[in-house]
């Protein structure tokens, strides 16, 4: 039986009783239902229930969940002993460990012992695995065991500030993984992330927030099953990766990257909701830079619903002064931000959106009518727009802007004015 060593005083004993005849109906429930209830608690809270009655004294040790925070122990060694005891008990009883959540302090880290414990977690059939390494990104990171590459039971994998070593000759197969969340993760090899994705045939949700000092040359997302993808890169400008997306089932995509080396979108779902916040170097005397932006815009032209940042609009506007923009005839809904930007960056892009039905504009200041007259909303948009929302500060000029759209949009049926 697993022993308790949580360094937290237990609360005073409480009785769990209903108001019906004073009978403890909850404790009379079958063991598997009580364990199901305890599995919704952290391990610390689950252990505390052991003082309720003799019926509850050992139930916590039968729960298929370990949810631990190193701060609840005297030290990492104390926590390690608790984990070992808990898993040995489960192994002896033939029980599975469905969920393993660990908030970890790396300053007392022993790699071999840590890997041995995670190998045991994999062996016990873990479905949900979360490792949150509580350490600054400038310090050493925890390395994941190679056994994770072939965990057949794993469904959800959430990792913070860890390292994935190259699998080498080890086969990679994650047949059940549906969700991957990687934040501050380093991949020791340019193909590691791509291999993880391609070896997960039922993957539905993927979030990648690379470690600032991870020097991946390519972030390649190729998946037939992926429905949601988010990329948020905080890397230095000189180390930006190439990004390629080929995910025909994608329903949602968000890409936030300072200056990607390239961004190619081959296939996504036909009605995917897309958020783009990227910028490019405005050095359009360089043919390679023109090609880079052209490839990005070609991918953009296939989108149905788009949320676009001010800095992306600025990059597109600068490009339009050198090269013609492709038509964005598929674009049905556009949510455009002009925060900390100006009205002038918008019309060039709008002029290629000939079938736009819905437009949401977010502005931190109202453009003067002179600005709009110099850079007017293209006629193709005014003749197709059905819905307009203006997210602007409440000023007298706001009504002037609304009046401009109401007079000029011939097909407009609904306008919504709101504050930022």
Image (tube, rainbow, N blue to C red):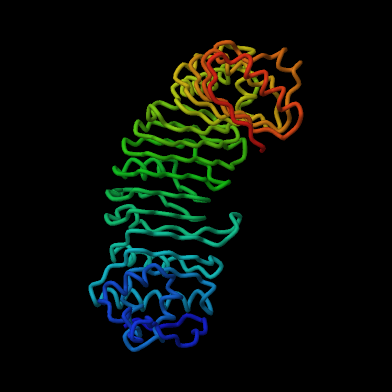
Asked whether, in this view, residue 174 is left or right of residue 420, the answer is left
Q: Is residue 400 above or below residue 205?
A: above
Q: Which of 179/159 is in front?
A: 179
Q: Quadrant of the N terminus?
A: bottom left
Q: Position of residue 32 (x, y in %)?
A: 26, 73
Tell me which residue sits at (61%, 25%) in the image: 313
Q: Which residue reaches farthest left? A: 94
Residue 408, quarter of the rendered image: top right
Q: Position of residue 275 (x, y in %)?
A: 52, 34
Asked whether, in this view, residue 51 is left or right of residue 280, the answer is left
Q: Which of 8/164 is in front?
A: 8
Q: Is residue 56 above or below residue 384?
A: below
Tell me which residue sits at (71%, 26%) in the image: 399
Tell me which residue sits at (42%, 52%) in the image: 165
Is residue 348 among the parts visible in the rendering? yes
Q: Which of 403/6 is in front?
A: 403
Q: Which residue reaches farthest front? A: 20
Q: Quadrant of the C terminus?
A: top right
Q: Position of residue 124 (x, y in %)?
A: 29, 66
Q: Position of residue 202 (x, y in %)?
A: 30, 44
């Amino acid at each position: 039986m697993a022993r308790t060593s949580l360094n937290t005083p237990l609360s005073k004993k409480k009785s769990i009783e209903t108001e019906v005849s004073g009978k403890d109906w909850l404790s009379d429930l079958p063991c598997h239902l009580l364990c199901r209830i305890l599995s919704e608690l952290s391990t610390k809270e689950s252990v505390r229930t052991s003082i309720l009655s003799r019926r509850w004294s050992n139930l916590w040790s039968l729960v298929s969940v370990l949810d631990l925070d190193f701060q609840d122990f005297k030290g990492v060694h104390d926590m390690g002993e608790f984990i070992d005891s808990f898993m040995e008990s489960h192994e002896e009883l033939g029980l599975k460990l469905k969920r393993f959540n660990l908030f970890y302090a790396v300053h007392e880290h022993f790699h071999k012992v840590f890997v041995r414990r995670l190998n045991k977690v994999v062996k016990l059939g873990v479905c949900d695995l979360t490792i949150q390494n509580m350490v600054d990104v400038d310090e050493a990171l925890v390395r994941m065991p190679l056994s994770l590459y072939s965990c057949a039971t794993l469904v959800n994998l959430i990792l913070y500030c860890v390292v994935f070593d190259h699998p080498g000759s080890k086969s990679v197969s994650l047949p059940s993984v549906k969700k991957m969340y990687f934040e501050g993760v380093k991949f020791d090899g340019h193909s590691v992330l791509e291999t993880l994705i391609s070896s997960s045939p039922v993957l539905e949700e993927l979030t990648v927030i690379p470690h600032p000092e991870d020097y991946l040359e390519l972030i390649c997302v190729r998946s037939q099953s992926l429905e949601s993808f988010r990329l948020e890169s905080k890397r230095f400008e000189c180390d930006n990766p190439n990004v390629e997306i080929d995910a025909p089932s994608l329903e949602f995509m968000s890409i936030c990257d300072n200056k990607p080396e390239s961004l190619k979108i081959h296939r996504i779902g036909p009605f995917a909701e897309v958020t783009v916040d990227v910028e490019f170097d405005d050095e359009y005397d360089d043919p390679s830079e023109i090609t880079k932006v052209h490839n990005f815009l070609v991918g953009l032209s296939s989108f149905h619903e788009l949320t676009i940042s001010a800095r992306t609009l600025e990059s597109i506007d600068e490009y339009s002064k050198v090269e013609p923009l492709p038509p964005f005839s598929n674009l049905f809904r556009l949510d455009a931000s002009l925060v900390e930007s100006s009205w002038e960056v918008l019309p060039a892009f709008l002029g290629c959106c000939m079938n736009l039905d819905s437009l949401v504009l977010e502005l931190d200041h109202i453009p003067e009518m002179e600005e709009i007259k110099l850079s007017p909303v293209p006629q193709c948009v005014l003749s197709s727009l059905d819905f307009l929302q203006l997210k602007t500060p409440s000023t007298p000029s706001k009504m002037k802007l609304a009046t401009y759209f109401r007079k000029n949009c011939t097909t407009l049926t609904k306008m919504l004015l709101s504050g930022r």
